[in-house]
Amino acid sequence: MDLKEVMGQKSFAVVGDTLNDEKYAYKIKHALLDKGYTVYAVGKELASINEIEGDIDIIDLCINPAKGLKLIRECTKSFKCIVIQPGAESAELITYMQEKKLPYIEGCLLVGLKLYTNQ
């Protein structure tokens, strides 16, 4: 899946500090909501991806890599792709995803919103 395909999905789990307006997770959450996406906030609002009641298409990691890895390891929900935001990546996280054959891309949803949405 590439960034354009990611932006064609409907529901996103944004993982990070979605309550602090200075953090990228907050900015991403609100930009997605403004464009009409379904957004679930994990990290400060929900403690786990598994707490999301609805279906999710995309998990967006905008969090410390060690915390992101922990949440992904615990995740039992199905999803189509994980987006690893700049700064949320680590060799351990990438290795884990490759070993588990989890679909992921490294990219920025804010860029994706500018390039691939026209609302």
Image (cartoon, rainbow, N blue to C red):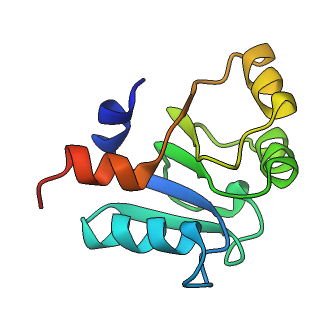
Q: Is residue 102 above or below residue 30?
A: above
Across and down, in percent, residue 15 comes to: 64, 60
Residue 3 in view of the camera: yes
Q: Nearer the viewer, residue 119 or 57?
A: 119
Q: Residue at x 77, y 69 (%)?
A: 47
Q: Nearer the viewer, residue 54 or 25?
A: 25
Q: Which quadrant of the view contains residue 94?
A: top right
Q: Residue at x 82, y 43 (%)?
A: 69
Across and down, in percent, residue 38 comes to: 38, 62
Q: Is residue 56 above or below residue 6?
A: below
Q: Residue at x 75, y 61 (%)?
A: 48
| Quadrant where the image shows the N terminus | top left
Residue 79 in view of the camera: no
Q: Residue at x 53, y 74 (%)?
A: 26
| Quadrant where the image shows the C terminus | bottom left
Across and down, in percent, residue 84 comes to: 61, 41
Left or right of 21 on screen, residue 34:
left
Left or right of 29 on screen, residue 25:
right
Q: Which quadrant of the view contains residue 63?
A: bottom right
Across and down, in percent, residue 55 comes to: 49, 50
